[in-house]
Image (tube, helix red, strand yellow):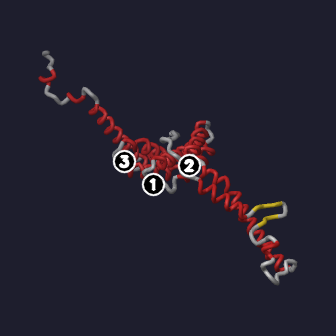
Amino acid sequence: MGQVYMCHRWPPPDASRHAACRAALLDKCIISRTGAKCPGDSQGEREHMPGARYDSPGIAGAMRCRRVRHLLTLLWLCSSIVGIDVYAGSWETVTEAGVQAFEQGRYLEAIRQFQAALDLTTAWPLEEPRVFSSFMNLASAHYAQTQYAQALPLYQRALAIQEQLSGPDHPALIPVLQAYAATHRKLAPWQSRFPWSPASRLTARARRLQAQDAQRVLQDTPGGWFSDLPTELLGGPEH
């Protein structure tokens, strides 16, 4: 348990809108050594406000509040740059960074990267394979960090997605069921001993799918096609 699930590389979502939006917003409000310069703060724009005395306490206070408001907006934008850059990067980039951190035992960093990858998939359809992989990756990182309560709903969501994509009896469900059951056992080790517990039911379902898959492989194996033929056609012991 602790396996990181990867899927095929795909073209990353277009992030040009994020970059253009960030550039436009930063152009609106620029910090200088004297504070925030925003539209309406220049002397030329002030002259369009007849009768306003900028040396009066009320006007000066209003201008200070205005500058503070714009400054806070800019600070929020600057604090969001890291998040914007994550979204501008490709899903593959943050996922590979998470895999590398996971393999090095840096599970908290892996969680951060896998969470960023999952955030990138919020607008994608469930049919997109990276959605399922993102849930499994993040769940595995939480499990490795012994954060079982956080891993449980992620495995549950991954199972629901895989069931929707492949049906309730597909062998692709086996690793998800096993991981989901293991997480239940970590959270409720004593209760999981009972056959009616979630862990026991998930494990039984995984074993049933394994048996079905093994039988399917046996039936598809060349040589097994003749197992149902009469013995005399195959050549009995006397031959």
Q: Residue at x 62, y 36 (%)?
A: 104
**Marks 3 and 1, Cα distance to the nearest angstrom?**
15 Å
- Residue of label 3: 166
Question: What crowding class fits label 3: few (fewer than 14 Cα within 10 Å), some (14-19), or many (20 or more)?
Answer: few
132 displayed left or right of 54 = left
Q: Position of residue 239 (x, y in %)?
A: 14, 15
- In the picture as drawn, the residue positioned furthest to the bottom comes out as 51
The type of residue carrying mark 1 is Pro
Q: Inspect the image, locate mark 2, and give the three-letter code of the amino acid beneath it.
A: Ala
Residue at image position (82%, 84%) is: 51
The residue at the point 38 percent across, 42 percent down is 206
Q: Nearer the viewer, residue 132 or 11?
A: 11
Q: Is residue 84 visible?
A: yes
Determine the CA span between mark 3 and mark 2.
Answer: 23 Å
Q: Earlier in the sequence, mark 2 or mark 1?
A: 2
- Residue 236 x/y as whole percent: 14, 20
> Circle 3 sits in a helix, a strand or a loop, which is it?
helix
Q: Any mark on residue 230, and which?
A: none
Q: From the image, tell me which residue sits under label 2.
A: 117
Label 3 close to label 2 by CB (< 8 Å): no
- Point out residue 8 in the picture as x, y percentages from the top left corner: 48, 41
In the picture, measured across the screen, residue 134 lies left or right of residue 168, that is: right
189 or 179, nearer to the observer: 179
Query: Does residue 73 lie above or below 184 as drawn?
Result: below
Q: Which residue is mark 1?
A: 125
Q: Is residue 65 left or right of residue 200?
A: right
Q: Quadrant of residue 53?
A: bottom right
Q: Is residue 19 above or below residue 73?
A: above
- Specify which label sits upstream in the sequence, 3 or 2: 2
Q: Could you tell which of marks 3 and 1 lies nearer the N-terminus? A: 1
Assess whether mark 1 and mark 3 are in contact (beta carbons under 8 angstroms): no
Instruction: Say which residue appears at 75% left-offset and 65% top-offset.
Output: 71
